[in-house]
Amino acid sequence: MNDIEASKSEMTMIAAELDSGIASTSFTGPPLLDPEPSTAGVRYTLHSKGSSGSSRSRPHARHSAPPALRTMPSSRARLTPDYKLLYQTHTRLYHRFLKSDYKLSALQTRGAPTNAHTNTIYCLQLYTYPSGLQVLFTGSRDKTVREWNMATGDLERVISGVHAASILSVCAHGGYLASAGSDNLVGVWDLEKNQLHKALADHSNSVLCVRFDDQRLVSCSKGNVVVFPRFLNIAQPFRYEDHTVRVYSFPDLTPQFILRAHRAAVNAVSISRNLIASGSGDKSVRLWDANTDFQHPYILTGSSDKHLRLVNVLRLNEGWSTSLDYLYNPSELASSADTLNISAGSRPMCQCCGSENIRIVPSNIQGPCVHADLVRSVALGEDFVVSGSYDLSIKVWDRKTGAMIADLTRAHTARIFCIAVDRTKIVSCGEDQRICIWDFSHGIDTSFIHLS
């Protein structure tokens, strides 16, 4: 019972969302969705605002909805959250990840289905509409963004004509979709109106990443520094070729700031309230506009050095890394060699294979606890950290200790470019044009769980 009581605070937000979702039969903005009964659970019919006609039906969730959802309660009715069921389901999913108990499927492979991407898939993101429908947005070298229904696996729409080159990053939030491309553009798409909201052409080089929330949009770009010959005797003997972080207000997209401190391509950005984090090829992670009146976030990074690092921004000595140089002091290891039985030609394996019980492997053997190539994509969850690498593997790590708990392989045949995670699944895409779903909720009713 102590575990159940401890989970109540964690589930309060989910319970509130369940209450508000069931008590309301309509949403604040179009499209309006009305429930209709179905043998598979609750289904929803899409209507245009003010229209009485209906179009195609969409299932609400991957699994059947519980009976409580089939009848809409009166305005005074209150739904009592079943904390025990929520805790049990959360625990089952947690142990599924620990045991690598998943069902692997593919939304698309090379050339299938016929309306799939026709080239390398660089980026993806999971998104849940207010109705509860979860979709996946994917961006590709074929210059399109595709929207996939995660309940049926069907392709819902193709967004094209915005970019003239590869799409490198996508971000969906609050009814909008932002995409960034190697054509130096950021496109913002209104998902409800199904039309372009605005295109931003301020970068002078490929836009490598875009992220936004309710208040701001942030983008970052590739770039170089052009150095002029000394004999020209120019006061400033160099010129920036972008590699900037640009900040816009949202949704009006008015330019606010241009951040120029990085000395190489800015590969990734992230937003947490008023804090912006950027990671660059100059081997630095920079924090911008940080306030002290809220809890500072953790920053998770992956790198071409094949390692992950998780850092608490407020207390930099908290966190972990899969890098031996970061975890261990060579002089301390040498002084404790007898205790650890470190023989010549051996080295300690990374902490993520057993943080307190260090194991020894021969120096010429790559331990399974680290990636064997560049770490291209990382995701930070409540319990786990997930990483995708050019070594064709996806690894799952314990968020608190850095211990590796799952090594997912044999799904991709070429480099992995992007991963996305929610409470039930991992989704990955890559150079092989495959979109893979690692479903850890198979056989479990998760229709009442807030996925993101």
Image: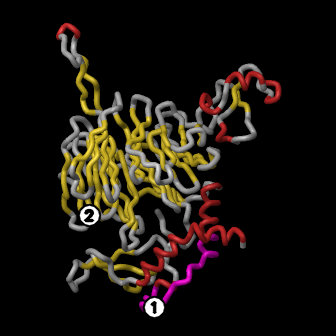
**Quadrant of the drawing holding the N terminus:** bottom right
Q: In the image, what residue type sits under mark 2?
A: Leu
Point out the residue furthest to the front here: 293
Q: Are marks 1 and 2 in contact (CB under 8 Å)?
A: no
Q: On residue 191, which mark appears?
A: 2
| Residue 34 image position (x, y, % from top left) | 33, 83
Name which residue lies at 37% across and 85% down. 36
Residue 403 appears in the picture as rendered: yes
* Residue 75 painted magenta: yes
Residue that extends furthest to the top in the rendered view of this protein? 231
State which quadrant residue 108 falls in.
bottom left
Q: CA distance from mark 1 to mark 2?
A: 33 Å
Q: Residue at x 54, y 35 (%)?
A: 307
In the picture of the structure, the residue carrying the numbered disc 1 is 76
Under tag 1, what secondary structure?
A: loop
Residue type of the residue flagged with mark 1: Arg
Determine whether 233 is above or below 174 in the image. above
The foreground one among 356 and 10 is 10
- Region rendered in magenta: 70-88
Prevalent SS, magenta region: loop
Q: Is residue 103 magenta?
A: no
Query: Does residue 111 appear in this view?
Result: no
Q: Nearer the viewer, residue 27 or 377?
A: 27
Of callouts 1 and 2, which one flags the residue occurring earlier in the amino acid sequence? 1
Please tell me the numbered disc located at residue 324.
none
Question: Residue 156, percent across and down?
Answer: 30, 65
